[in-house]
Image: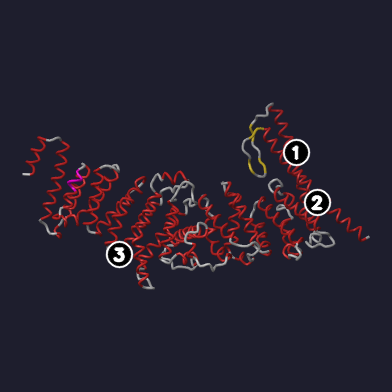
Amino acid sequence: MRSAVAAVVNFSMPEGQTQTIMAVDELQAIIQRCQILEEADFRGEDYNLFQVAGQKCLEDGYAAQLLEVIQNVKNKVIIKNMGWNLISPLVRCILAYKQEDEKRELCLKILDQLVQLCNPKELFLGLLEQIEQTSGEQVCQTIMLLLQPLQTVLLKLQNKKAYSVGLSLAMIMNQLTPLPVPYTKQQIQEDKLGLCQCCNAVVDFAKPFVNEVVKNMEKSSECNDTELKEELLKFCMKSLKYPLLTAQLEELEGIEEHPFRRFAAEIIDILLDMRELMPLVFLHHKSRRSLWENQEFEDIERKNSADSLACLSYLVFVQHFGINCFPMVFSSSYLLQCNMAHIEVLLKRTEESMLSKGLDLFESCLLRMEDNGLLHQYLEFREFINVSQDLVKVMTLCPIEHLRKKSLNILQLFIDKFEAEGKYTLFRCLLKTSNHAGVEGYVIKNIKDQIHLSLTKAHDNVWFTGHHLISLLDLVLLLPEGAETDLLQYSDRIMASLNLLRYLVIKDCESDNQTGVWTALAKIEENFLKPLHVGLNMSKAHYEAEIKNKKENRKEAHSSNTICSLTVSGEKMPPMTTEMQLQVLHSALFTFDLIESVLARVEELIEVKVKAVMDENI
């Protein structure tokens, strides 16, 4: 009978309408067949036929007929068991239709009906499968489409609810993580892929489950819903690493509600509600039992956790999210100590967003402290030394100029916070480990400032006078490789050392000898002044010979535009004309002349002072 009707239809109707009516007929035929079966008698073939026919109805634009079938009370058992199979074609159609399309609204109504009628367990797996399979530009669209249905289904689940919530959040975050995080104001406003909107939608998705944990905690001091709480905590930790660790979180002019600031505030609120914020900020150093037998997995988890905790500290102590809930009992030095591990994590990164967070967190902690109040014992903590070395690397290697400048300011701030012995210890460490003449020159200038304070204050400072200072000067007043030292490369350090020595000779009379410099003069001459003389003579002779050679080559080539290479301070310079090379060589000679003039002035001052003392003794 059905084939005869189809033949008549085929004879009298256009092909498209025939196919649609056939699809609807096929769906009705399957429905009629299943209506007379018991639920236990449904076969795999029935599920497949239902999915194919339903999909064809959707693709041919006859969602209205499909909706009628689903809403028919007689089909309730069939939809409960088979309806979840329609999720995949349904999602494809919804994403394909434009926002204002009437067919899209019909598809959304079908989705809503499926959420109400289908088996929650089967529908949960179907929704999660769609999220897992999405990719590229459709990731955020798919997730935002399915968050509400997924939340409704999860709230219906009775068994393994915590596991299912955790699996959902993990799947969602895994899909979002590969997406680039908008960083500039323009990128945030455009939100091209919808990440900003999606992140805040995910937090709203999690709220009912957070509320459930909070209610259980209020009922009992020992929360019996630890599994759900643990899953939500994992979500918060993942969110701290992505997108918040990468995101720009400063307030931006022209953006009334910064989406990532809102997301950060929501994550902090979740941690506060579950009473996990304080333990994470202050008790992170307590070891937790590892769940991994594989060492590689354990290392990855530890690194991810370190990144998340570093971001959390930044949110609390720099952006002040949740800060009002903190008891005002912690000393500024304790807060610095707690945050040093986080600062170290951030300063080891090379991305601008993370480096800037590390510098901001370090600066924020230091600004809470008074100058000269940080005890030298803090330098016994490994993180304090590591952070100072990481800061030097940012100063010298970071390609971003404003971060280099900021790191230099923070280094000075760090120095200022230590009391005398701490400054002394830090200076020794930096001189031994920085391996950068500019940094060493900067440290030597700081040493000179501390000596000046010691000599001008009413009370003596034992760390920058006498035998302690002489021990420090042993690291300062020497050439790293003797007379063979590359004077051009070390010019910043050498000039700072000569200026320090000149200051000591002028300020400290030989009769007083507060600094001890006059006692150590013979050693200073042997280790520093004499090798410097020899090195200057060798360097000047070498560069003068190079200049003469370049000039002769220029005459032979009859052109000053010949491109050649040049090596200065061990580094090969970019290709330059002979004239450009000559300019570089003359600049080097000027530097040597400058060093030589300061050296001559220092030796002259020493000679005058020594002669004056000898005259007094006659």
Quick one: label 1, few (<14), some, or many (20+) residues within 10 Å? some
Q: What quarter of the picture does the C terminus occupy?
A: bottom right
Can residue 27 be found in the magenta stretch? Answer: no
Q: Which residue is mark 3?
A: 160
Q: What quarter of the picture does the N terminus occupy?
A: top left
**Residue that lies at the very extreme toward the top in this rendered image:** 558
Confirm or deny contact between disc 3 and disc 1 (CB under 8 A): no
Q: What secondary structure characterizes most of the magenta part?
A: helix
Quick one: label 2, few (<14), some, or many (20+) residues within 10 Å? many
**Residue that lies at the very extreme toward the bottom in this rendered image:** 221
Residue toward you, 76 or 482: 76
| Element on which disc 3 rests | loop
From which residue to which does the magenta span run? 62-66
Can you give x and y, in whole percent of width and height, for residue 209 in the image? 34, 62
Instruction: Mark 3 or mark 1: name the one nearer the start of the chain.
Output: 3
* Tag of residue 602: 2
Can you give x and y, in whole percent of width and height, for residue 208 in the image? 33, 61
Distance in Å between CA atoms under marks 3 and 2: 81 Å
* Tag of residue 544: 1
Please state if 391 lies on the left or on the right of 123 as rendered.
right
Can you give x and y, in whole percent of width and height, for residue 139 in the image? 35, 48
Going by the numbered disc 2, the residue's amino acid type is Val
Residue toward you, 139 or 581: 139
| Element on which disc 1 rests | helix
Which residue is rendered at x = 68% and y = 28% of the image? 557
Quick one: label 3, few (<14), some, or many (20+) residues within 10 Å? few
